Amino acid sequence: MYSPLKHLLVVILLFCFSSFSYAADLTREIGLNIDKSSEPENFFEVGLGLNAFNRSIINVDDKEDLDIGITLIGSYNWHNFFVDFANQAPDSLVFGYTAYNRENWSFDVILTGPGSGLRKKENQVNFEGIEERDVNTMIGGRLTGYIGENVVQLTLKQGLTSRNGGAVASALIGRNWQIRNLNFHSIFALSFRQAKLNDYYYGVSEEEAARTNFAAYDGKSSLNFDSSIGLTYPISENVLLRAEVFFGSEFGYNESPLFSKQQDFYTGISSSISYVF
């Protein structure tokens, strides 16, 4: 299992990967081929997931690339208001209001809650002298539409605090193919992060550099792509099997000295078995 600092990799890096940051209901919609004209569905899933990634690594002693853990995914909708949650996603909790929903297009106003950030492990010396970072609370808009067989989603979010109040913009396109009981899906996404946000998470100030072994570093704006291909198989009416492979880029921010392993591209696989309520 990941240490608290290794968990930073999952929380902060996935935070900037738009393929992980769309709402839980859209993820499920693509994966299960749900009718786009149907009303939003309230659901809750609990399961066991296995993830393995080969990517840049924050400077920690634990070098494990395999994570086994509980997955929790759900959505609750009431009079155009909704709450989406996915415990392994960067935006683990999303509050929103659907301000527009006509034919093939909808627009949501969203608020993402704070999550885990950089927290030093007890007796951990790697980040001694490095200030802790918090995941920012962000507000923004999300446009979702259907073009032919494809689902597209455009998101723009702005931080609400002065320290890490940068913006994140993302665009993704996804679609699925039904073959008997197997539902295959693919997603491709682009995400842009302002320099202020990257500098907050990955930058090393002159003061931090003076009291640590890290070199000073100023974060820059970054543009990255992410892609995934997966399948969903209903084992029974309430049990779902999912599997997915990932490929994307990490350049633009992994030059930070906080990374002990630096890669321009990442790969990964994941699988899970979930029970649907």
Image (cartoon, helix red, strand yellow):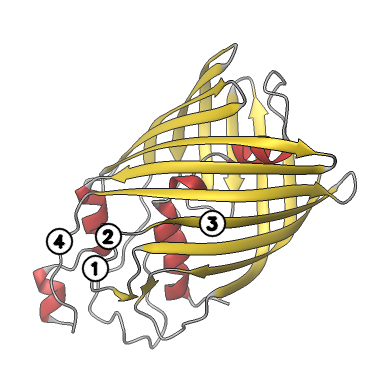
Q: Residue at x 38, y 81 (%)?
A: 60
Q: How far is mark 1 from mark 3, CA to CA?
A: 23 Å
Measure how far apart labels 3 and 2 are at the Cα level: 19 Å
**Which mark is in front, 3 or 4?**
3
The residue that disc 3 covers is 246
* Residue ID for mark 1: 256
Gap in angstroms between the C-alphas marked 1 and 4: 8 Å
> Could you say where residue 192 lies in the image, as x and y percent from the top left?
31, 43
Q: Earlier in the sequence, mark 2 or mark 4?
A: 4
Q: Are marks 1 and 4 in contact (CB under 8 Å)?
A: no
Q: Few, some or many C-alpha atoms within 10 Å of disc 1 (few <14, some 14-19, many ≥20)? A: many
Tell me how many marks there are: 4
Between 81 and 106, the one lying in front of the other is 106
| Residue underneath mark 2 | 253
- Horizontally, is 18 left or right of 239 in the view? left
Alpha carbon distance from label 3 to label 4: 29 Å
**Residue 218, label in figure:** 4
Provide residue 225's location: percent of width, then percent of height.
39, 48
The 10 Å Cα crowd at callout 4, few under 14, some 14 to 19, many 20 or more, is: some
Foreground residue among 21 and 173: 173
Q: Is residue 63 visible?
A: yes
Which disc number belongs to residue 117?
none
Nearest to N terminus: mark 1 or mark 4: 4
| First-in-chain label (3 vs 4) | 4
Kind of residue sitting beneath label 4: Asp
